[in-house]
Image (spheres, grey):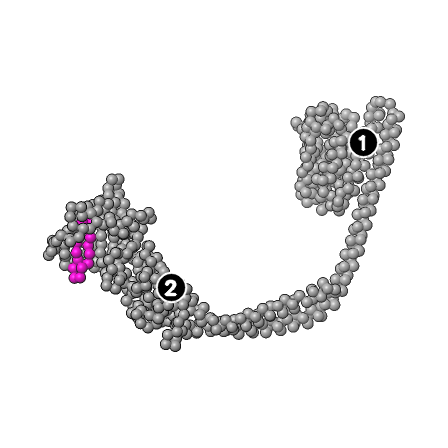
Amino acid sequence: MPDRNRAFSWPYITSAAVLLLGLVWIAWGIVRMGQRDQDLAEVALTRTIAVVRGDVQEAFGQVNKDLQLEGAFVAAHDSLSRDVLLERWNALFASRWPISAIRLADEQGNELAMIRDGGGTILRETSKGSEFGPPLVIHLPDDQPLDSATEVVIGDSMVDPRTENWYSRALEDRRGEPVWSLSTVRDSSGRADMIAALLIRPRHEGAPFRILAFMVSPGQVLATVHDADASGNARSVILTEDGRPLTSTTSAADHGSGPFAEAMKQWDPERSRRPQYLTVGGERLAMQVLPTNIGGVIMHVGTLINVGTLRSWLRPEWLFLWVTVALFAALLVLMVLVFLRNRRDLGRLKEQQKRSRTQQRKLAKVIGERDVLDREVHHRVKNNLQVLSSLLNLQAQRVDEGPSRDEFLRGKRRIDIMALVHQKLYGMPDLRGIDLERFFDELAGSVAAMYPKSRNVSYAFDTDHIRCDPDTAIELGIILCELMANCMQHAFPFVTGGHIDVSVRQVEGELYRLVVKDNGQGLSGEAAHRPGKLGLEIVDALAEKLDGTFKYRSNGGTTFDVLFRMLH
């Protein structure tokens, strides 16, 4: 009864649990709606910073591409004239305003540098790290060739590019990509230019390596990075590692006053990467600053978002809550319908279960009684055969030695084999499906004990986990005992040992094959007609009884092949 009640109640218990969880979910969602503004702000901050980070990486990536293109040109020539380099560098200065200087140095300290200087450029040549004096400095007007130089002077300080940070960082690179570093010179606002350097390896052994470097103004590189998203809800600023603004956008302009100023007051002392919240002018703002790595130079991307403008994003969630309420109402109606239907079917189900249990009890009783009866029958058959064997043994003692007595003893041994088969059969744990491998193994051990001279003969079984009914098992057991007795008595007449393989395989459908194979002396034509041939005739008769055939052949031993049929 408890099982029936549980079977009847579980759909309603499950549905009630689902409804309860749904109500808890809806209540939690309503409570959480007050916190969703903050969650949305954090999502918006994360996405905006990711976009700005990508723009920053792309902006500096363009400088890397220009540097790699120029480096590829330099690497293709072991030596380049100054005029060729100036022609290319003038073109770079004209098309790439962020580049403020281009420097090409080698491992001996020789350097050619082109530097922007107000309305013109400065060409500086350094020989062997200023070992023999300061560099040569040439002032050139914009877009003018070298022969138009108006002023050539000696520099006022020694220059050795090998002592500078960008030079050593380029030497440390193993990936063949530009590396970035900060210039040691800062402007009045404390900002420093950035230097991208590329190691150019020689094409020929013994030639010096060279390093090409671009000095750029970060503010000009980042001039194309937008400070606001498409909706205008978020504004961004790009800062140096120490918190100084690099961009000249409106968001950076109010870094000294306004919302960004208030936000940076909270960020500067802590350098926290977590979102922070503040209220300025009655508006709730969210701010987050995260670092980004440009070839080893750390910058910070800061984003400020007005949380109040994000509330329109919550409309889909409110819609989801109302749809959920409607679904739960439909589920409640469905639950009532299922309850009414189960009430109608419950009586029918109980009656069917009662009939099933009654039939199962009767069937279990019949099976148990039949199993006991089968075991008792096999036991009695075994006992009767043993009595008969004992009588034959007494009778054999009255027969004189000779062929008649030998034939008499062979008949007694066959009765012993039949008794053995029945004894092993009723010892099987499951008479409805006899495990042939276990059955054969126990029979073989008992047969081997009848022939002490063959104690060195080994045997192995492979029945492919086939099971059979008791009637078939009796016939197969007698066949196996006859064939193994034949092998041990005739295939191995001397105490030299040998081996017998027994296998059972399904051929197709209900047709199976039993193969007994020994590696003994073989069965000659004369042996087939000697005394004891009755055993093979018995095997042939039993095979025919199983709707099968029996064949044997000798070739380096004897192989007995029994085809038989067995219902599944």
SS state under label 1? helix
Residue 249, visible in the rendered structure: yes
Q: Which residue is drawn at 77% across and 30% down?
A: 450
Q: Pinpoint residue 143: horizontal percent, then vertical percent.
A: 16, 58
In the rendered structure, are the residues bearing label 1 and label 2 in contact, judged by CB atoms less than 8 Å apart? no
Q: Which residue is drawn at 20% across and 47% down?
A: 129
Type of amino acid at the residue the image marks with label 1: Arg
Residue 230, visible in the rendered structure: no
Rendering quarter of residue 533: top right
Tell me which segment is drawn in magenta.
111-126
SS state under label 2? helix
Q: Pinpoint residue 560: horizontal percent, then vertical percent.
A: 70, 33
Q: In this view, does 378 lie above or below 154?
A: above
Q: Say which mark, if any, is on residue 270.
A: 2
Mark 1, residues whose alpha carbon is within 10 Å: few (<14), some, or many (≥20)?
A: some
Dominant SS in magenta: strand
Most distant residue in the bottom direction: 282
Which residue carries the number 1 mark? Answer: 413
Q: Pinpoint residue 95: horizontal percent, then vertical percent.
A: 23, 59
Q: Pinpoint residue 498: horizontal percent, then vertical percent.
A: 68, 28
Q: Which residue is drawn at 44% across and 70% down?
A: 38
Q: Is residue 351 above or below residue 508?
A: below
